[in-house]
Amino acid sequence: MTEAPSSPARRSVRVDLGDRSYDILIGPGLIAAAGAEISSRMKGRRVAVITDEHVAPIYLEPFMRSLAGGGIQAVSLVLPAGEKTKSFPHLMDVCDSVLGARIERNDAVVALGGGVIGDLTGFAAGIVRRGSRFIQVPTSLLAQVDSSVGGKTGINSRHGKNLIGVFHQPDLVLADTDVLDTLSPREFAAGYAEVAKYGLIDKPEFFAWLEKNWRDIFAGGDARIEAIATSCQAKADVVAADERENGLRALLNLGHTFGHALEAATEYDSRRLVHGEGVSIGMVLAHQFSARMNLASPDDARRVEAHLGEVGLPISMAQIPGSLPPAETLMDAIAQDKKVKSGKLTFILTRGIGQSFVADDVPPSEVLAFLKDKYPK
Ligand code: NAD
Ligand code: GLY
């Protein structure tokens, strides 16, 4: 499925996009190896490293040392952690930092952090000098299996999540699996929701493997590396087939329409809900809604609920702390989501485990009635 290069535990996945193809290296020790990996692939000798206040105290110094060892000069910018950092003021901070460091076309902008830092930094890299080289060093499980791959970048608007951004592919992704040991259990589980997503989209055998092996994945070691490599390969295949989301790529949004609406409803407050938790609840709702529409068996929805619940993820809206706005407000967020075409709702629905499909004519009235049923009483 994936090749094993230099280190026995290290895996490599290629994202095949012609002359914009790139490698995702996955395995232990990649922060220490970053300087050598980057300098062997890059003409320029300068980088700007963007990170956040949680990641910086643990990984910035070793990462900068690794870069220096590879003969690369680096400046760094540390931003606040959290979803609210995906905003115009911080986009400006990143652009100014990159320009201030005189990063040129052959140099690179580096995101060292989770999906928030990756999305924001990638957007800045996509617009500074009309497009600069970009390297992802994802440090959360979610970023390693999803957000660092595929070139979607952006920030949030008060109208919704990720509504402002560009496609800008990275030149290299370095996923050091050791760094996941410092991730909180809650954030690890949130990233796991996106791992499970690949099984639920079109890999029923992968989902069954996860049901059996999830404890080993949470514990670390080979099963974790295997799960990350399989997820990256799944995403790389979809991105290579449909980079700009004209069709197939929409499947990667399984659970995201409900999830994004819940994130907006909780005002992106990570104490209440983080992205992967929204996706977890969203995937359960997508399976329950598919059963309600007689597309899938309710047993499949129960199986998804059971697995995501046992790994510690929230599986219902009632588990979100605090009160939610009325179901109609959630519907407004769903309608504002970019998966709407000519007033009809586009949802990723399913005919069973690993049998997801794009439904682009879902009646809003059915969704509202379903949400009202599922709303915490
Ligand atoms: P995040 O970036 O907020 O990281 C989660 C938390 O973990 C943060 O507090 C961060 O500081 C901390 N952290 C990260 N790595 C750590 C480490 N190794 N040790 C200790 N703490 C660490 O959130 P996330 O879950 O990584 O990403 C979510 C974001 O990704 C959302 O904004 C979502 O919209 C976006 N996303 C984008 C895509 C895409 O294709 N571009 C796909 C999925 C999600
Ligand atoms: N996470 C959705 C996508 O990359 O398309």
Image (spheres, grey):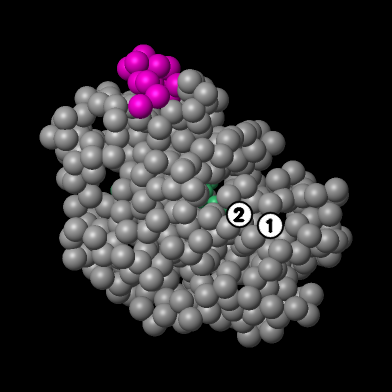
- Figure quadrant of residue 233: bottom left
Is there CB contact under 8 Å for labels 2 and 1? yes
Q: Is residue 86 magenta?
A: no
**Residue 148, x across and y down, in percent:** 43, 47
Question: Can residue 51 be seen in the rendering of this structure?
Answer: no
- Judge whether 220 appears above or below 90 on screen: below
Under circle 1, the secondary element is: loop
The disc placed on residue 242 is 2
Instruction: Report how many numbered discs are placed on residues in the image.
Output: 2
Under circle 2, the secondary element is: loop
**Residue 247, x across and y down, in percent:** 68, 57
Q: Is residue 97 magenta?
A: yes
Specify start and end residues of the magenta stretch as a single range: 93-106
Q: Residue at x 35, y 66 (%)?
A: 2
Q: Amino acid at mark 2?
A: Asp
Q: Residue at x 29, y 34 (%)?
A: 42
Q: Residues within 10 Å of mark 2 (few under 14, many from 20)?
A: some
Q: Is residue 366 left or right of residue 184?
A: right
Q: Residue at x 59, y 78 (%)?
A: 353
Q: Residue at x 19, y 58 (%)?
A: 6
**Residue 249, x across and y down, in percent:** 61, 57
- Judge whether 103 appears above or below 133 on screen: above
Q: Earlier in the sequence, mark 2 or mark 1?
A: 2
The residue pinned by badge 1 equals 247
In this orientation, which residue lies closer to the viewer: 136 or 217? 136
- Figure quadrant of residue 213: bottom left
The disc placed on residue 80 is none
Q: Residues within 10 Å of mark 1 (few under 14, many from 20)?
A: few
Q: Is residue 82 left or right of residue 320?
A: left
Q: Amino acid at mark 1?
A: Gly
Q: CA distance from mark 2 to mark 1?
A: 7 Å
The quadrant of the picture occupied by the N terminus is bottom left
